[in-house]
Amino acid sequence: AFAAFILLGRSRCNAQSGWSHKDIDDLLFWGVLGVVIGGRLGEVLFYQPGYYFNHPAEIIEVWKGGMSFHGGLAGVLIALWAYGRKTGRSFLQVGDFVGPLVPLGLMFGRIGNFINGELWGRAADPSLPWAMVFPQVDDLPRHPSQLYQAGMEGLLLFLLLWWYSARPRPIGAVSGVFMLGYGVFRAIGEFFRTPDEGIFGLSYSVSMGQWLSLPMILIGAWLLWRAHQSGRSPMP
């Protein structure tokens, strides 16, 4: 995932873009910092607050697993804001450059979930040709939801963003497409994934991932609308 970020990022570096290879290395450092801190805090606050309230010392034990994408995203957004302040770029300028570089990393992450037998799907019709049994759960055929999400949140979102960002777009438009696209694809993928508990344990048939994707969809749509309304040209 890191190699894909570096290779794709460097392929977009040129005099016209205003980005250098050193910028890519710095972005990776800031991004990883945001992912680890934000992802862990998201897991603690959104998914297992009761457990970590009773075992606070385990919050820092990130090597035991337990990371939240939406928490990681929040951490990355804060890191990108800080990086933009440091380099004299706006938050949306940084987001527009980074957005197309992220989905392939998400794809590799979901493939890793599949290989490790994590985040398995809901029980499927036994006649479904690609239904799989995850023996660490039970002997029921299930949707390989990790692969669905790898295809949607990873490959499809990457292709969409790479195509959309190939031409100059108003500032904030690429960031909007990323937020909107990820939110929609994640919400769809959640229908096939074994759901986590909803907010405060009340799901109302909506998973935690879908609740957290809703703000992304709304913010992404607003950013896209605002960018095209303002018509501000991309800036390095």
Image: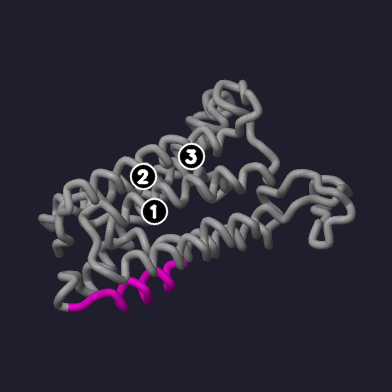
Residue 73: x %, y % from top left: 40, 46
Q: Which residue is mark 3?
A: 213
Q: Residue at x 66, y 37 (%)?
A: 195
Q: Is residue 28 left or right of residue 60?
A: left
Q: Is residue 2 above or below residue 203?
A: below
Quarter of the picture containing the C terminus is bottom left
Residue at figure coordinates x 15%, y 77% from the top left: 15
Query: Which callout, 3 or 2, points at the residue further toward the start of the chain?
Result: 3
Residue bearing the label numbered 2: 220
Q: Looking at the rendering, which quadrant does residue 199 occupy?
A: top right
- State the CA–CA distance, disc 3 to disc 2: 10 Å
Decide whether the magenta segment is chiefly helix, strand or loop: helix
| Mark sitting on residue 165 | none
| Residue 86 image offset from top left, x and y in percent | 14, 53
Question: For residue 2: magenta?
Answer: yes
Q: Is residue 96 above or below residue 137?
A: below
Q: Amino acid under label 3?
A: Ser
Q: For mark 2, does the 10 Å Cα neighbourhood hold few (<14), some (14 to 19), or many (20 or more) residues?
A: many
Q: Are marks 2 and 1 in contact (CB under 8 Å)?
A: yes
3D distance between C-alphas at marks 3 and 1: 12 Å
Instruction: Estimate how packed mark 1 is, as few (under 14), some (14 to 19) or many (20 or more) residues with alpha carbons within 10 Å.
Output: many
The residue under label 1 is: 178
What element does badge 3 sit on? helix
Return the disc, 3 or 1, that comes first in the chain's sequence. 1
